[in-house]
Amino acid sequence: MRRWNGWGNSDVTSLLTSAALGFLRQVIGEPAAPHDATLRQVLARVAKTPSRLPRHPLVDASAAARLAASFGQSAWDWLRLRFGEVDAVTDGVAFPEHEGQVRELLDWAASVRACVLPCGGATSVVGHLMPPNDPRPLLTLNLTRMMRLKWLDPVAQLAGFEAGVAGPQLESQLRAQGFTLGHYPQSFECSTLGGWVVTRSSGQQSARYGRIEQLFAGGTLITPSASLRVGGYPASAAGPDLREWVMGSEGRLGVLTEAIVRVTRLPEVEQFVGLFFPDWERAIAAVRELAQARLGLSMLRLANATETMTTLTLAGHARAIAWLERYLLLRGAGGPGENRKCLLLAGFTGGRIQVAAMRRLAFAIAARYGVVSTGALLGRKWAASRFRGAYLRNSLWDAGYAVDTMETACDWSQTPSMVEAIESAGRKAMADCGERVHACTHLSHVYASGSSVYSTFVYRIGPDYPTALARWRALKQSVGDAIVAMGGTISHQHGVGKDHAPWLVHEKGAAGLRAIAAVVHHFDPDGLMARGNLLGDA
């Protein structure tokens, strides 16, 4: 069962040790435990605002359904839910079970002049599900009952799925027939295939399997004006690729109901290895060379020194970590009290001979930069809990700390300075609020020409909603401005939503935004779909 005001399933917890809490108090300050609104209080507040939609047999207008459909996982979503600031909610939720019902609901919404917001796993961290500032009623279409594997072609290695299928459901259906999609974002447990496509998601092992752009072969988009079928070819030179209109469209053009994806045979071997470098300079040089060597590794995930230290501190198991620190000291990669070493998690996936060759080549490159391998132990621990990291948000909040992330991508020549600019911007923003922030960064995906930069900020929530909101806004504005000033994209893997919309013009330009708006108007002439997302026109 999903948590109503936090991350993930309610039966999964990720506790902070006393050592971890002591560390946070030292670097950020003594927090005050928040006074969260209760579910009963929040539902009562939602019920005071009646639905503006007429009755429809497929639409649920109950307070519980409306509440659940109006919030994702952005920091602002959390603040509104936890403090009970829930005045803006959808007017009703429909759970279509097939494409025909999607068409019926879009036509009905147009007839009653209602806006429509498609929804999948509700894991957006950039405000996609926040109801728009629009006088018309809002209908949310939740696609999660559309989760079937419709067909699988093992010869072409293509599969057709309904777009509401969540990550675990998708993988279980494929693995039963010996295949995998290999798309594992942090939100894998809850997010859906359709959400991955329309927000241009990137999975943790995209270095082998590809980002969703490489995996999405085609599909069906139901728009207010027409049904659009795109792609379906191995390759095509027949003009612009209409798949590109769907990918990253964030619900503005219509509802993605079916996605054709490129799948892969299950690998013989999969290994994750923990490697430590003596310092950031050598670590980033090694990872760049590994990426440019195009060895076929499935993952290269590099934490800077602060994130490495934070990971080891929050891990618990003090005796094991102390042993690890002594071992690294003996091998020349730093030791206790030294905050310079950087942890790289490398993934080796494929056939046995292929993996053995990749390991030899990768270790030969890494050895030139002073690497110390800890073998597969850290890698196995990471793989076993790879989707549990997000659950720390729940425990941190309960302790009085808020968490937000910002991510971008830039060329290798800009990567070190981008990391510094993002972290410095976050620290300055919180200092201006009279607060401290713990900032750390990892490179979650690397490419031959550059890297993603993924930064995490932990800070004190604040005593009330206005204070907490002001702190988050200051952080978001400062870091977003720093990213575009350095020439980075405003989003490498989370999409634009409403939170990032103000910065999109820096990447697309005014003419580019007008072109996107023209395509939106073509498929949605009455402006019904996902208002405010992408274009920020709420």
Image (cartoon, grey):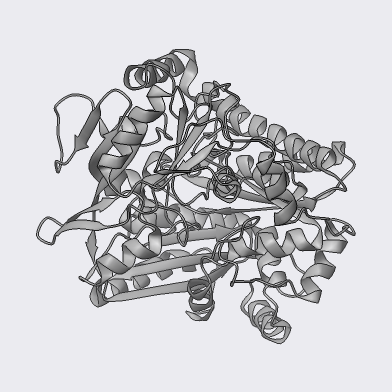
Query: Compared with residue 313, is residue 24 higher up or lower down, i.e. above or below?
Result: above
Rendered image quadrant of residue 502: top right
* 470 lies left or right of 49: right
Q: Nearer the viewer, residue 209 or 104?
A: 104
Query: Going by the image, does 53 lie left or right of 165?
Result: right
* Whether residue 175 is situated above or below residue 414 in the rendered picture: below
Please tell me which residue is depicted at 78% across the width and 43% down the height of the picture: 427
- For the C terminus, the quadrant is top right
Specify whether 508 is left or right of 101: right
Q: From this viewpoint, which residue is outermost toward the left?
A: 155
**Residue depicted at 70% across the width and 32% down the height:** 477
Along the line of sight, the residue nearer the viewer: 139 or 492: 139
Measured from the top left, where is residue 325 in percent x and y?
Answer: 69, 78
Q: Position of residue 172 (x, y in %)?
A: 32, 69
Q: Residue 232 lies in what quarter of the image? A: top left
Q: Is residue 32 left or right of residue 340?
A: right
Q: Can residue 241 be seen by looking at this rendering?
A: no
Report the label total.
0
Q: Say which of 133 and 41 sits in front.
A: 41
Relative height, residue 202 to residue 491 (above, below) = below
Residue 39 location (% of width, % of height): 70, 55
Q: Residue at x 35, y 46 (%)?
A: 96
Residue at image point 59% right, 37% down: 130
Residue 403: percent from the left, percent from the top? 70, 52
